[in-house]
Image (tube, rainbow, N blue to C red):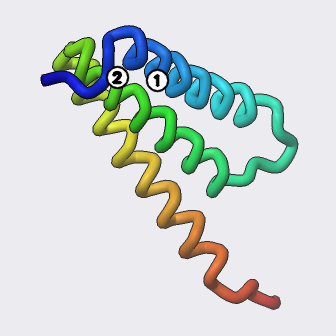
Amino acid sequence: MTIITPFAADLIGFAGSFCIVAAFAYANSAKAMNKLAFNIVNFIGAALLAVSLTVNYNLPTLVLEFVWMAIALYGIFGALRSRARPARTP
């Protein structure tokens, strides 16, 4: 039994695609990039696409989205870790 209709899965997938494209555009236009926000938006986009791919199944793309989420999580933890460190003074 499918909980999400194919049309709803497509809408979720479009939302995920929008998140990833918006993050990419932000990364290329921001003077000073907020790495935490960038990676959170990328993670959300990949997660939404992964949800849509459970209905409109495509294994290579689903694997890609899980890799994308893992890289985004690495970036999120890195950004949080760098924020937690006190600034060095020379």
Identify the element where label 2 is drawn. Answer: helix
Seen at 52% across and 59% down, the residue is 76
Spatial CA span between label 2 and label 1? 6 Å
Residue furthest to the right: 31
* Place of residue 71 in the rendered image (x, y in percent of width and height, measured from the top left): 40, 46
Counting other residues with Cα less than 10 Å from the Cα at mark 2, is it few (<14), some (14-19), or many (20 or more)? many
Q: Is residue 16 above or below residue 39?
A: above
Residue 41 relative to residue 28: left or right = left
Identified at 63% across, 84% down, the residue is 85
Between 66 and 12, the one lying in front of the other is 12
Which of disc 1 and disc 2 is earlier in sequence? 1
Q: Are marks 2 and 1 in contact (CB under 8 Å)?
A: yes
Q: Is residue 11 above or below residue 44?
A: above
Residue denoted by label 1:
12
* Quadrant of the frame with the C terminus: bottom right
Q: Secondary structure at mark 1?
A: helix
Number of numbered tags placed on the structure image: 2
Mark 1: few, some, or many residues within 10 Å (few <14, many ≥20)? many
Image coordinates for residue 82, horizontal then vertical, percent:
61, 73
> In the displayed structure, would residue 41 be above or below residue 22?
below
Q: Which residue is mark 2?
A: 52
Q: Amino acid at mark 1?
A: Ile
The numbered mark at residue 79 is none
**Image location (x, y in percent) of residue 13:** 44, 20
32 with respect to 21 (left or right): right
**Residue 45 horizontal/vertical position (percent):** 50, 33
Task: Tell me where residue 67 sits by quadrant.
Answer: top left
| Residue type for callout 2 | Ser
Residue 8 sits in which quadrant? top left
- Position of 29 compared to 34: left or right? right
Is 15 left, or right, of 30 in this rendering? left
Instruction: Give the residue furthest to the left.
Output: 1
